[in-house]
Structures are given as C-alpha cells and as structure tokens.
Amino acid sequence: MTSTRRLAVGTCVVMAGLVVLSLGAGALTATFTEITPPSTPFDLNDAGQLVGPRFVQDVDGAYRHLPNPPGFNNSQAYGVNSHGDVVGFTEVMAAFYSDTAVLWPAGGAPVTLGMPPGDVESHAVDINDAGVIVGISKAEQPGPGWLSSWVRDPEDGIFVDLGTLPGAGDGQIEVTAINNAGVATGNVHMGISSIWLGFTWTEAGGMVAMPLPTDETAFWPLDINNVGQILGRGSSGTTYVWDPVGGFTELTMDGHDSAVGAALNDSGLVVGTVRDEYPDGIPGQEGEEDPITSITSPAAWDLSTGDATVFPYADHWSQAFVAVNNNGVALSTGHRTFLVEIGPDTVPSVPPPPAAVPAATDPTYTG
C-alpha cells in the first residue's frame, strides 16, 4: 500500500500513513443550462455530443438513434470517443449467451464485433480517438478465465487478451477504460481473497498492477485521462485519483457525509457528487410521514489548484455530475438534465441555492 494525500476543505494535518492536504482559497463556479434529451444521457465527448443508452445528440440538438444490428432486438451503449463513435453491446432478449460487443461508427450502421475464440458473450466498454476498443468477455462456465478483458485494434479487428496478474486465481479481469495514448485500466480479483487490484495495460508493457491506497483492500478504476491519471474507488467507498508520479489523492468534501467522483478530464478536473443524510428528514420536513432523508448534490474538484465546490440544487431535488469533457463542460443528471460550464472563481464562497428551480439558462446558479 502507499501513502495517500487527502484533498478536502480543511487544515493541513498529518496522520499515520496519510497526508491531509488543505485546499487553496479559491473556488469553482458553474453555469447550468438545462437540456431536454430523449432520455437520460450518461456521457458527453469533446465535441459536446451527448450519449444515452440508445442515442447520440449533437450540440445543435440533432438526434441520432442507435439501432439494433440485424438479428438483435436490444442494445446498450457504454462509451464514446471524440468523433462520435459509440460502443456497447447488443443481444437477443430472453436468449442465453447472446450478448455481443457492437460498434456504432459515427454516421454508419452498427457493426457487431463478435468475441474472442472460446467465449460466449462480449461487451465493448470504451473506445479511444484512434478507434481502439476495450471490452470484456465471458466463458460459458465460471472458473479460471471466465471473465476476461481484451483490446481490439481497428486495423486488423483481432482481439488481444489483456492477460492477468500473478495470483489472480479466479480469472475476474474487468477493463473499464482506455485513453488516447493506448493505456487501458481496470481491476483484477486476486483469487479467493477480498483484494481487488487496479491495473494499467499497454501494448508494449502488458498488464501492470497498481498499488493500493492506504488502508484499502481494493481499488476499482473507473476512468483514465490522457495524461494517465486514474479515477477510482477503494474498498471503503472512498474516491481516489492516482497519478503516475504523485500517487493517490483522496477526494473528500468537508461538511458533507460522503463524496463520490464520476469522471475526470485531462486538466485534472474531477466531477461527481456529495451526499448528505438526514435520518429525520431534510430541514423543514422533520416529522413528516414520508420525508426526504438524503440529498445528492453536484460537486467538482480541480486537482491542479486544489479548489473544490459543491453546487446545491434547489427544492431538495438530487442532482449528480456524471461526466466531464476536456472543454470543462460537465453533464448533470437527476431531477433534470443540464450541461454545466465549470471554471475558476475569484470568490471563495458558495452562494445559497436559488429559491426556485433554475431556468433553461441561469447564470445566477453558480458556486
């Protein structure tokens, strides 16, 4: 395990194996613009395109449905690159072992990718700007190698197994993301123990184990940016960012019960949520028959400056940041859906939330 920095609002103290790092005086600001996609999106790319389970929506509002390939009747998108190429899986509902990795090229018909020899199901989970795809596949019976991970180069279409780590006895290897440098990341279950190790993979170096954060028995990578920083979650539920040079930084937000990161961009901007619990009901609802007992709010952390801010939402509705692109635009979903421009602010305080739900574009909804 390695020592861990803790990025939070607070003073600088040192505990055993853990450095608690105070934030700078600055804060972040955000302008929320409401959008109305056909269903809830989960990602956006650097071109500003939104991606949902079965659609892509351009910045001008033009909508592209992601159709099922011939012979299939259900599909799910997982990842998108800056060109608008989308990957996921397709299936025949109610049929055993029908899940098949699929690519929806920008402007083209869906292409089923198949799966590595000997496997019965496959899912494509991410694609980089060079068209390199990573995914997972399953063997018919659980056992050694039953869940494996692969990379597929667009030039030859060959599936390359990512391999495994020494001591990984049950074969659960799950890739989650790949960046434009061709570095993939994911996790490996280490045998029958409760230890899950994160990994990085490159074509030249193969699979390399990541260290564990202090006092954690697992690290599950979620996202990787183009400078190699990896966002992930530890066994305690804590969110960390791992830097190839600086190691782990813990993300917290003082004054809130928990913080969860969802995505990061190349400048080190992390977006996610904070959660606050109210066992007796939120303020003003205490004692009611069915009160709201928890609220999630969008939050952002800037690793380059140490700034962090929570953006409270009006009327006690929960919102969450789920994605961010390299232009500093985040996607917020929940009660409503917003595109959010995030940037630095010279005012180090957070104004109160608006009295009403924000309008379609409300510059007063800032933090």
Image (cartoon, helix red, strand yellow):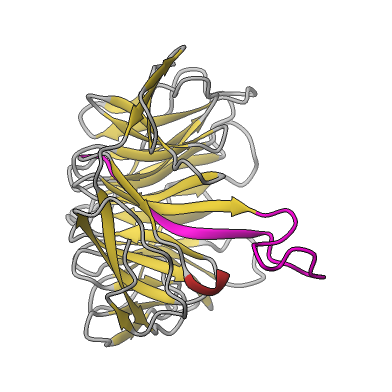
Q: Is residue 348 magenta?
A: no
Residue drawn at 35 percent across, 59 percent down: 323
User: Farthest residue in the right direction?
Assistant: 289
Residue drawn at 53 percent across, 62 percent down: 99
Quarter of the figure that contains the C terminus: bottom left
Quarter of the figure that contains the N terminus: top left
Q: Is residue 344 above or below residue 169?
A: below
* Position of residue 148 in the picture relative to residue 208 (left or right): right
- The picture places residue 253, in percent across and down from the top left corner, at 44, 43
- The picture places residue 134, in percent across and down from the top left corner, at 34, 49
Q: Of residues 75 and 186, which is closer to you in this image? A: 186
Q: Of residues 276 and 165, which is closer to you in this image? A: 276
- The picture places residue 89, in percent across and down from the top left corner, at 46, 64
Bounds of the magenta segment:
278-304
User: Farthest residue in the top direction?
Assistant: 16
Residue 2 visible, this orientation: yes
